[in-house]
Image (spheres, grey):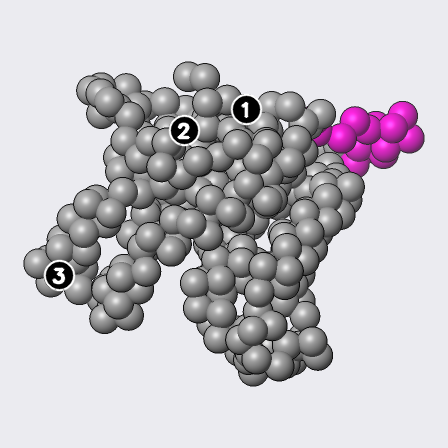
Amino acid sequence: MNTNQYCYTEKNFKIADAPTFVKDSSKDLKKIKKQVKENVKQINKAQAMMNARRKYSVLIVLQGMDAAGKDSLIKHILEGVNPVGFNVANFKTPTAEELNHDFLWRINQKLPSRGQIGIFNRSYYEDVLISRVHPSIILNNNLPEIHSLEDVNDEFFEKRYREIRDYEQYLTDNGYVILKFFLHLSKDEQKRRFMSRIETPEKNWKLSAADIRERQYWNKYQIVYEKAINKTSTEENPWYVIPADDKWYSRLIVSNILTEQLKKLPLAYPTMAEKQEKELQIAKQLLQDEDKY
């Protein structure tokens, strides 16, 4: 699979031209599941080496409309990874404490430590997505230069885009590999999944009236996603736009990309110094001889 077709590093992303479905994507579902399973094994091995050296961290940023499949994707591509080696952070409406800090403060609290894979299920990008669809949210941030909705303008968001680019570059300079995935779902497929949640009792909890109300802003979200991706895609930290109408195919693409990026890292288990080797041999001998005493 050529994953470069899903990668955007320049300001050339047009959301209307990006596919939400790949023809014949589920033609061989058994083969797709097998490849995802193999990718999980590779991810697990790579994470174990990352954890042993503690030089790099991987940060996976997941964005997408409601019902795009973020939760199930996390479950399926990281199910074989040691739980100690990864963590998932979900960013919802900021708390009162979080609003008393800069918008990236709560993000820093959830960054994966060195050697870990961290997943942001929604992220700091909410501050240029939902906040751009509903600019009144910014008024709650107590920002010194924001006094009315007129101040939440293009200039304000241009500054936010720059701050995000700078933040991601800072993380990259400090050993973070940032993988940003936009799960691109069609409006028809979202409706189908919402209907499934309504008609299946055990799925009712997944849907709220707010989800349906937010759907009326679909076109606005398409616009702000396109802007955010174009404004924050760079050579070092590109966006990957993943067709999300077929969940298993989206899992395959994301797990392929993650596996490919991990292979690029100079990962290896630490080598032992001569002195440490001698100490291990002494310890081995002590263990072998302990029954003699």
Q: Is residue 213 left or right of residue 182?
A: left
- All told, the count of numbered labels is 3
Q: Quadrant of residue 104?
A: bottom right
63 lies left or right of 248? right
Residue beneath the point at 55% across and 41% down = 230
Residue picked out by circle 1: 260
Kindly report the distance in space between the C-alpha atoms of the residues bearing marks 3 and 2: 29 Å
SS at circle 1: helix
The magenta stretch spans which residues?
268-283
Q: Is residue 79 visible?
A: no
The three-letter amino acid code for the residue at tag 1 is Glu
Q: Earlier in the sequence, mark 3 or mark 2?
A: 3
Q: Dot 1: within a 10 Å radius of its alpha carbon, few (fewer than 14), some, or many (20 or more) residues?
A: some
Give the image location of residue 178, x and y in percent: 61, 41
The answer to whether one can see residue 22 in this image is yes
Labels 1 & 2 near each other (Cβ < 8 A):
no
- In what quadrant of the picture does the N terminus appear? top left
Q: Nearer the viewer, residue 285 or 238?
A: 238
Residue 65: image location, x then y, percent: 35, 52
Examine the rendered structure and indicate whether residue 160 appears above or below residue 189: below
Q: Left or right of 285: which side holds 61? A: left
Residue at the spot of label 2: 253
**Residue mark closest to the camera, 1 vs 3:** 3
- Which amino acid is tagged 3? Ile
